[in-house]
Image: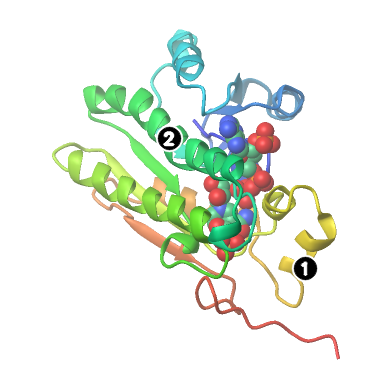
């Protein structure tokens, strides 16, 4: 099951895992995009439409899965977003609520819904998408960085709590990945979004999907606990060396 499967890293994970022979439950809230994925991938893909912030709807969707899709082996907790890039003292309350509700509470809801079945079967893998932003705050990143630091703690906590089982828990921490992320962050200001990726070759969604697949396909006794994946000219959340145009 991949959340936020309708764009970017999530969509790349869908393609990568299906090509590797998995059947994928693609979840998202964009029905049209989910239908397109269904048309592209056919019987190997089951679309499931819900917003990760709506816990009861998510639970009802999972409870109504067809019998042959009920045993989820891998949960990729990917749905998430950044909204805004401004000083904390000027931040927008609604943006903050949306990031916290999606990146932290949505991820927790999905974990709470899916992981008990994995524990019962003593089989499963949870792959959470954190970020380099969770390692340390960067200028104006404040609340987004905090949500990804929370994802790190929540992931570490889960790994401890299932250490007595065969379950594996992985945190992927990407740096700059060129997706729809910055368009969303800047509320549709494409020009500002494009600047984020100027002068550097950013990562692609596929780069992160490949890392997720690597973790999933590691031998059963190998738990890839954490991976920080950066573009070659990015050193951390604040240090990016760009080629100048002149
Ligand atoms: P995209 O904007 O391309 O994709 C985000 C996906 O999450 C979309 O499918 C979006 O659906 C979905 N989503 C957002 N909110 C919700 C919600 N409430 N319920 C269900 N689905 C939701 O960005 P990315 O692919 O880059 O982002 C994926 C993850 O990767 C996020 O958690 C992000 O924080 C993380 N990340 C991204 C990095 C980057 O540089 N791009 C780097 C590090 C981490 P919809 O289209 O309906 O909004
Ligand atoms: C997304 C990467 O550096 O824009 O998490 O925060 S960054």
Q: Quarter for ligand 1? A: top right
Q: Looking at the image, which residue is at 63% across and 20% down? A: 43
Q: Quadrant of residue 203?
A: bottom right
Q: Residue lying at the far left in this picture: please name it.
A: 164
Percent coordinates x, y for residue 242 in the rendering: 70, 82
**Colouring convention used in this rendered image of the protein:** rainbow
Which residue is nearer to you in this view: 165 or 104?
104
Q: Looking at the image, which residue is at 37% across and 50% down? A: 150
Judge whether residue 31 can be spotted in this image: yes
Drawn side of residue 32 relative to residue 219, left or right: right
Q: Mark number for residue 105?
A: 2
Judged from the image, the secondary structure of the residue bearing numbered disc 1 is: helix
Percent coordinates x, y for residue 149 in the rendering: 39, 56
Drawn side of residue 98 relative to residue 30, left or right: left
Drawn side of residue 200 relative to residue 150, left or right: right
Q: Quadrant of the C terminus?
A: bottom right
Residue topped by disc 1 = 195
Among numbered discs 1 and 2, the one appearing first in the sequence: 2
Percent coordinates x, y for residue 63 in the rendering: 43, 11
Judged from the image, the secondary structure of the residue bearing numbered disc 2 is: helix
Above or below, comparing residue 175 to residue 161 in the picture: below
How packed mark 2 is, by other alpha carbons closer than 10 Å (few <14, some 14-19, many 20 or more), is some
How packed mark 1 is, by other alpha carbons closer than 10 Å (few <14, some 14-19, many 20 or more), is few
């Amino acid at each position: 099951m991949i959340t936020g499967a309708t764009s970017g890293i999530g969509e790349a994970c869908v393609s990568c895992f299906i090509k590797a022979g998995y059947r994928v439950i693609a979840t998202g809230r964009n029905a049209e995009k989910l239908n397109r994925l269904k048309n592209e991938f056919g019987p190997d893909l089951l679309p499931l439409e819900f917003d990760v912030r709506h816990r009861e709807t998510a639970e009802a969707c999972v409870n109504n899965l067809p019998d042959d899709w009920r045993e989820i082996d891998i949960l990729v907790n990917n749905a998430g977003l950044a909204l805004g890039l401004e000083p904390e003292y000027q931040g927008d309350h609604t943006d903050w609520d949306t990031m916290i509700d999606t990146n932290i509470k949505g991820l927790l809801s999905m974990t709470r819904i899916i992981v008990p079945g994995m524990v019962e079967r003593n089989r499963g893998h949870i792959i959470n998408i954190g970020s380099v932003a969770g390692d340390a705050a960067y200028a104006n990143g404040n609340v987004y960085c905090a949500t990804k630091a929370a994802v790190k703690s929540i992931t570490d906590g889960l790994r401890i709590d299932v250490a007595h089982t065969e379950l594996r828990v992985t945190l992927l921490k990407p740096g700059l990945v060129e997706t729809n992320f910055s368009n969303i962050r800047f509320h549709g200001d494409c020009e500002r979004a494009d600047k984020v990726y100027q002068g550097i070759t950013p990562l692609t969604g596929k780069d992160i999907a490949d890392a997720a697949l690597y973790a999933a396909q590691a031998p059963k006794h190998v738990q890839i606990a954490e991976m920080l994946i950066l573009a070659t000219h990015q050193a951390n959340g604040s240090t990016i060396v760009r080629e100048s145009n002149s």
